[in-house]
Amino acid sequence: MNILIKPIITEKATKDAEDKNVFGFVVNPKANKVEIKKAVEATYGVSVEKVRTMNVRPDRKTRYTKTGVQTGKTNAYKKAIVQVAEGDTIDFYSNI
Protein backbone atom coordinates (compact mmCIF):
# COMPACT_ATOMS: atom_id res chain seq x y z
CA MET A 1 0.00 0.00 0.00
CA ASN A 2 1.46 3.36 -1.08
CA ILE A 3 0.84 5.67 1.88
CA LEU A 4 2.17 9.05 0.69
CA ILE A 5 0.53 10.08 -2.58
CA LYS A 6 1.89 13.62 -3.05
CA PRO A 7 2.94 16.67 -1.04
CA ILE A 8 0.63 19.67 -0.77
CA ILE A 9 2.41 22.67 -2.29
CA THR A 10 0.25 25.77 -1.88
CA GLU A 11 0.99 29.25 -0.59
CA LYS A 12 -0.42 28.42 2.84
CA ALA A 13 1.46 25.10 3.08
CA THR A 14 4.74 26.72 2.01
CA LYS A 15 4.32 29.49 4.61
CA ASP A 16 3.60 26.90 7.34
CA ALA A 17 6.68 24.93 6.29
CA GLU A 18 8.91 28.00 6.57
CA ASP A 19 7.43 29.36 9.81
CA LYS A 20 6.28 26.36 11.85
CA ASN A 21 8.10 23.29 10.38
CA VAL A 22 4.73 21.83 9.32
CA PHE A 23 4.26 19.99 6.02
CA GLY A 24 1.15 18.72 4.25
CA PHE A 25 0.63 15.50 2.28
CA VAL A 26 -2.20 13.83 0.39
CA VAL A 27 -2.24 10.30 1.78
CA ASN A 28 -4.00 7.00 1.24
CA PRO A 29 -7.51 7.16 2.77
CA LYS A 30 -6.93 3.86 4.63
CA ALA A 31 -3.62 4.94 6.23
CA ASN A 32 -3.53 5.74 9.95
CA LYS A 33 -1.32 8.23 11.81
CA VAL A 34 1.32 5.67 12.80
CA GLU A 35 1.73 4.46 9.19
CA ILE A 36 1.94 8.06 7.93
CA LYS A 37 4.62 8.89 10.52
CA LYS A 38 6.73 5.86 9.53
CA ALA A 39 6.37 6.64 5.81
CA VAL A 40 7.45 10.29 6.18
CA GLU A 41 10.41 9.35 8.38
CA ALA A 42 11.53 6.63 5.93
CA THR A 43 11.06 8.75 2.79
CA TYR A 44 12.53 12.08 3.92
CA GLY A 45 14.85 11.07 6.79
CA VAL A 46 13.33 13.41 9.37
CA SER A 47 11.89 12.80 12.84
CA VAL A 48 8.15 13.45 13.07
CA GLU A 49 6.69 14.93 16.25
CA LYS A 50 2.98 15.20 15.43
CA VAL A 51 0.59 13.96 12.73
CA ARG A 52 -2.89 15.39 12.18
CA THR A 53 -5.25 13.96 9.57
CA MET A 54 -8.48 15.07 7.95
CA ASN A 55 -10.82 13.70 5.33
CA VAL A 56 -11.56 16.33 2.70
CA ARG A 57 -15.06 16.07 1.32
CA PRO A 58 -15.83 16.46 -2.39
CA ASP A 59 -17.05 19.82 -3.68
CA ARG A 60 -20.27 19.54 -5.68
CA LYS A 61 -21.25 22.01 -8.38
CA THR A 62 -24.40 22.47 -10.46
CA ARG A 63 -24.39 24.50 -13.67
CA TYR A 64 -27.42 25.47 -15.74
CA THR A 65 -26.68 25.35 -19.49
CA LYS A 66 -28.60 25.31 -22.78
CA THR A 67 -28.51 21.52 -22.82
CA GLY A 68 -29.83 21.19 -19.26
CA VAL A 69 -28.47 20.87 -15.76
CA GLN A 70 -24.81 19.77 -15.52
CA THR A 71 -23.68 18.36 -12.17
CA GLY A 72 -20.19 17.37 -11.09
CA LYS A 73 -17.94 16.91 -8.11
CA THR A 74 -14.27 16.85 -7.17
CA ASN A 75 -12.63 13.81 -5.62
CA ALA A 76 -12.58 13.22 -1.87
CA TYR A 77 -9.15 12.62 -0.34
CA LYS A 78 -7.34 12.35 2.98
CA LYS A 79 -4.87 15.03 4.04
CA ALA A 80 -2.12 14.70 6.65
CA ILE A 81 -0.45 17.65 8.38
CA VAL A 82 2.95 16.54 9.70
CA GLN A 83 5.07 18.49 12.21
CA VAL A 84 8.78 17.61 12.10
CA ALA A 85 11.35 18.13 14.84
CA GLU A 86 13.15 21.45 15.30
CA GLY A 87 16.09 21.67 12.93
CA ASP A 88 14.72 19.09 10.46
CA THR A 89 13.20 20.19 7.18
CA ILE A 90 11.80 18.65 3.99
CA ASP A 91 12.83 20.12 0.63
CA PHE A 92 10.20 19.25 -1.99
CA TYR A 93 12.03 21.18 -4.75
CA SER A 94 15.40 19.40 -4.57
CA ASN A 95 14.71 16.70 -7.19
CA ILE A 96 13.11 18.88 -9.89
Image (spheres, rainbow, N blue to C red):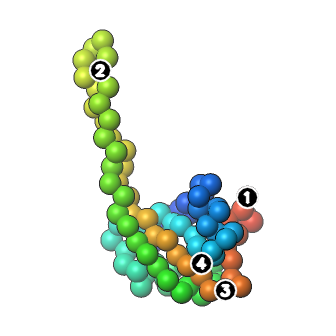
Determine the image quadrant of residue 20. Answer: bottom right
Residue located 73% across and 58% down the image = 96
Residue that badge 2 annotates: 64
First of labels 4, 3 by sequence position:
4
Kind of residue at badge 1: Ile
For label 4, the SS is helix
Q: Nearer the viewer, mark 1 or mark 3?
A: 3
Marked residue nearer the N-terminal end (1 or 3): 3
Question: Which mark is drawn over residue 96?
Answer: 1
Q: Are marks 2 and 4 in contact (CB under 8 Å)?
A: no
Give the amino acid at mark 2: Tyr
Q: Amino acid at mark 3?
A: Glu
Q: Say if 65 sits above or below 83 in the image.
A: above
Tell us which disc is closer to us: 1 or 2. Answer: 2
Q: CA distance from mark 2 to mark 3?
A: 51 Å
Name the element at disc 2: strand
- The disc at residue 86 is 3
Q: Circle 4 is placed at which residue position?
A: 43
